[in-house]
Amino acid sequence: MTEPLLQVRGLCKAFGALVVTDKLDFDLAAGETLAIIGPNGAGKTTLVAQLAGDVRPDSGAIAFGGRSIVRESADARARLGIARSFQITTIVPSFTAEDNVALAVQGRTATAMRFWQPARADADLRAPARAALERVGLAARANVRASDLSHGEARVLEVAMALACEPVLLLLDEPMAGMGHDESLAMIALLRTIKTEATMILIEHDMEAVAQLADRVMVLVGGRAVASGAYDDVRRDPVVRDAYLGES
Amino acid sequence: MAVPVAAAAFGQPFWVNAATRIVIYGLAAMSLDLIVGYGAMVSFGHAAFFALGGYTAAILLTNGIDSALVTWPSATFASALLAAAVGALSLRTSGVYFIMITLAFGQMVYYATVALKMFGGTDGLPVPVRSVLPLIDLRDATTFYAACCVLLVAFFILASRLVESRFGMVVRGAAESERRLTALGFPVARYRLVAFVISGAAAGLAGALWADFSRFVSPDMASWTRSGEFLVMVILGGMGSLAGGLYGAAVLTGFESLFSGFTEHWMLVLGVMLILIVLFAKRGIYGVLAGRSHD
């Protein structure tokens, strides 16, 4: 078997007395989609933040593609191919949808700063941006300011931006949060197509989405992985039923 | 934006002088707008770069180096260096802390100018001659004014290209969502620092022009009220418009000469106007002139 794309070993993080990540170990194979579920406050978002580099773990190791990234900054990790969407939609509100995606393309392709050529006339940025918008079904809204998009559209835009990064690893923090039923179904369909191209970690509360998308499910409770495995197995696990699924 | 530039171009010395002041302050305000209006970096120490540029030019001129091809670039470069140092430290903070730390750096430069007796201390430093250029007689008031206009327009073009470039999109995007830009792989701090240095460098050039124009530099150039005036010009003229910096400079300078004749309290009128602008016309004079169509 080949080396896993992502290896997490002994990851620990506490905010004061509150332990949010507790000696976490897991691997993620290239191409795999891992869903992380768990009750509120289980440490799901903080875990993703540690993988993305926004939050520094207290101890533990994170290896990505065989190299340790635990000391790399968030922007350096992004350049290594880790893209993400946030729990709260995080886009540039005054830019158009296309400007937002073009920025993502620029982040992937350019290393040097360029000061003179107008970015909005740059076909190297605009063509891939339009293609990404086309793919997620936002092409008709390309020139709308991001702040004027509906909540659901903005969520989709964020996924389009992550896609435009051509990520190796995609971290999605509740991409369907606050969406209506139809929008959720469309998002699931979109993520199913993306899942074949990128390795994905998905935080999700919607069990329908988890069932459809995840190759493997990890259940976090109090910062610890209490169960991990295929969706159906995890669902039947008594510990999980007790800690999480049982409450609904 | 050429209107106020052209309007007062030729004629009485009084108007040429007033217009030159406006153009020099306009350049400083425009450079500040680049970071405040586009990068949300509210620097309250911009006068430090203006002053350092002025002192650099003044010191060169008092030592017999009077070529504008030396004085102006030297002033620009000195202020760029200072901006790199100030920016590297200040840009670790944001919001109110950034305002405070840039203010603190501004005050340090102010007290340095006061303390350095060899450069005149509180009395300031008279500038013996104005910089010279080959073939162009800068010592003629109208010609000097024209040269200032050329530099202002050059910076305006440069800055306009800058804010629409790939670089500019990153700085502007980061002003609204630093998290997103970081998550896309941009080293946001580095981009901001470059913008800060460009801004400081242009303010240094404005300071050099001021030294040439007024033939005098003093700690007053570095005072925090001067930094405040630059900010007022930017807000009055319209943040994030570049040209607004010039309009703000024109209005502020105009107000001063218009109302200070009647009352010492002309700032009161300005205060009221600033409140109205902030409440009702967020894009300032530029916004009113350009119409509200695109908002």
Image (spheres, coloured by chain):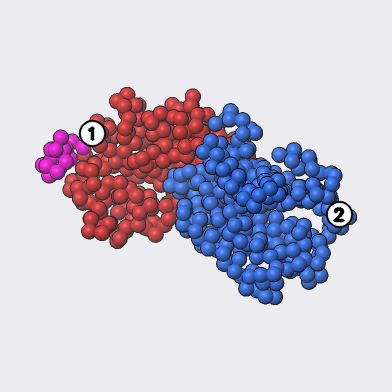
Judge left or right: residue B176 versus residue B216: left
Q: Which chain is blue?
A: B
Looking at the figure, which quarter contains the N terminus of chain B? top right
> Which residues make up the magenta segment?
A231-248
Chain A colour is: red
Nearer the observer, B222 or A233: B222
Kindly identify the residue that appears in the image at 51 percent across and 36 percent down: A95
Label 2 neighbour load within 10 Å: few <14, some 14-19, many 20+: few
Which label lies toward us, 2 or 1? 2
Looking at the figure, which quarter contains the C terminus of chain B? top right
Same chain letter for marks 2 and 1: no
Q: Which residue, given by chain and number where applicable, does mark 1 sit on?
A: A207
Q: Chain of mark 1?
A: A
Judge left or right: residue B169 versus residue A242: right
Quadrant in the rendering for residue B166: top right
Kindly identify the residue that appears in the image at 69 percent across and 61 percent down: B53
Q: Which residue, given by chain and number where applicable, does mark 2 sit on?
A: B140
Dot 1 amino acid type: Met
- Residue A87: x, y in percent? 34, 41
Q: Is residue B169 above or below residue B212?
A: above
